[in-house]
Amino acid sequence: MGSECRGMRSRRNKLDEPNMTSGASSMIYGPVGSRLRDIVLVTALALAGMFAMGCSPAKEEAAQSPGSMPVPGEIVSIQGEPLSPTATMKEVLDHPDPFERAKRVSEILQRSGPEDLDDLMHAFETAPLEKGDLEYGLFGYWWARFDPQAAFTYADNTLRTDHGSVILQVVRAWAHADPIGALESDMLTSRDTQSPGIREELTDVFTISWFESGLPGLEDWMVQQQDPRGIANSLRAYGRMKIFEMGPEAALEWSRTAPFEDADRRLIMAGMLNIIAHQYPEMAIDWIRVAEEDGVDTRTFTSRVARSWAHHEPEKAVEWILAEVESEYDRGQALNQATRRWLRKDEPGLAKWLEGHVGEKWSDLMRNQDIRWYIRKNFFQVDWADAMNRALAISQENFRHGMAAWVLQRWFVVNINDAEAWLVANPDAIPPDFVERARKISPIERAEIEEALAHHGGVKS
C-alpha cells in the first residue's frame, strides 16, 4: 500500500479548503457515516424555517409557557432561552436545546482556529452531554481539518467504544482533505489480521469523502485493496455517489462501460440498484434485464431491489417477485428480504395478506417469519389461538408441526392452563411427539419469556 499510495500522492493537485456545508449528498450515503450528517442537515433546515417564518423569541417563550401547547404547524424553540451572541462554548454546551446547541457550536467552530483547541477541548470534556452527540462530531470534524492524526487518536482512544460516530466525522474531514496521507498514516488500518486494509466501518465514509473531494487516486485505491469486503463496500459507495453526480438512469448507463473490471462494475451496479429501487423500482427492474443481456452476473440483484422496494411498498414488491422472478433461489432470497421489511412496516397487513395464500408452499417461510415476529415483537402477549392458526396454515407437514410446537412451547410458559385447554379442544392438530417436545424449553429461553412478561405486564399462570 505504501508504494502505491506514494504513486498516487505524486498525482495530487493542491488541496482545496474542506467544505463543511456540502450536505446535500447525505441522502444517498447509506447507513454508515450518514446519521450525524443527516442530523446536521435537518437542524439547518429547521433553523432556516424558523427564521423564514419570523418566529420571534417572544413567540417561542409564549409557546413554552406553563400549560401552553404548540400550535400545529408553528415552529418553536424546544426549550430554554436564546443564547447571547457572545456565549462561550461552555455556555453553549450547557444549553438544553439541541437545535440551539448545534447552531451555536457550528458558529463558534467556524471562527475558531488551532490556537483555540485547548480551550475548546476543555469545554467538550466537561460538558454534560453524551460524548457521541452531534456537537462532538462537529468538534471532531473541525479538529481534523488542521490536525487529523491528533483528532483521530483522541476520538479513537477516548470515544471509539461507545461513540463511533465521532470517528466517522474525523475520517470524513481527513479523507476530504488528504486521503492518501490518511492511508499512509496506517492509523485507519484494521486491527483484525484477517481483514487487511482500513477498518470496515470506515470504508463507506472514506470513499464518499474522497469522491466529494475530487482528488485523484480513488478508483485505483478501491480496486487495489487487499480485503475483498473493502473492495465491495467501497465500490458500492462509489456507485451511490455516481447516482448523485449523474442521476439514476445516466449512472446506470455509465456503469455498463465504466473503466473497471467486469466484477467491479457488477458491484457498482449492485450499489446503485440498492438506492434506485427505493424511488424507481420499475427502473431498477428494467436494469436487471439490461444487466442480464450484457452478461452480468445478476445474482443478488433481485433481492436487493426487493429489499429496497419493500421499505415503501412491500405488497407490490412481493407480487413482482411472485409474478416475474423465475429462479427458485432468487425468489426465496427476495421473498426473505421483502418479508423482513414488510414485518417492520405493517405486520398485521402481512398477516392479512397471507390469509389469501393458504396452501401455497412458497408462503411457508413467510409465515414462519411472520409468526416469530408477531410473538416476539409483542413481548409474548398475543392471541395464542390465532398464532396457532397461523402456524397450522403452513403447507409442509413437518414444517407445520414444528412451527406449531414452537408456538405451543412459548404458550406453555405464558399461560399453561389456556395452552392445555387448546390441546384438549384440538387433539389431532399436533402429533404427540411434537407436543412432548413443546413441553421442554431451555432455561435461557424460559428466562427470556418471563423477563419480557415482567417488564411488559404479561400474565403468567
Image (spheres, rainbow, N blue to C red):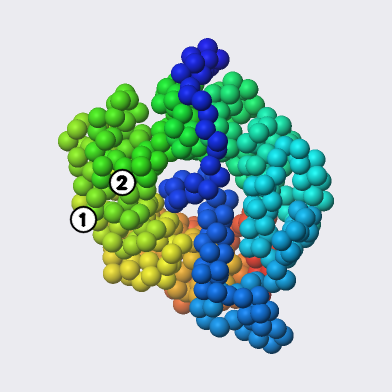
Residue shown at 26% from the left, 59% from the top: 319
* Residue 208 percent across, percent down from the top left: 47, 38
The disc labelled 1 sits on which kind of residue?
Answer: Ala
Please name whichever residue, 356 or 446, is drawn nearer the observer in this view of the structure: 356
* Residue 69 percent across, percent down from the top left: 62, 84
| Looking at the image, residue 168 lies above or below residue 405 | above
On screen, residue 47 versus residue 253, left or right, reads: right
Residue 289 appears anywhere in the view: yes
- Disc sitting over residue 443 in the figure: none
- Extreme left residue here? 293
Residue position marked by numbered label 2 in the rendering: 247
Please name whichever residue, 394 or 305, is drawn nearer the observer in this view of the structure: 305
Mark 1 residue element: helix
| Between marks 2 and 1 in the image, the one whose residue lies nearer the viewer | 2
Q: Quadrant of residue 101?
A: bottom right
Residue 152 appears anywhere in the view: no
The disc labelled 2 sits on which kind of residue?
Answer: Gly
| Looking at the image, residue 95 lies above or below residue 149 | below
Mark 2 residue element: loop
On screen, residue 270 versus residue 203, left or right, reads: left
| Looking at the image, residue 9 lies above or below residue 356 | above
- Disc sitting over residue 323 in the figure: 1
* Quarter of the image with the C terminus in it: bottom right
Image marks 2 and 1: residues in contact by CB distance under 8 Å = no
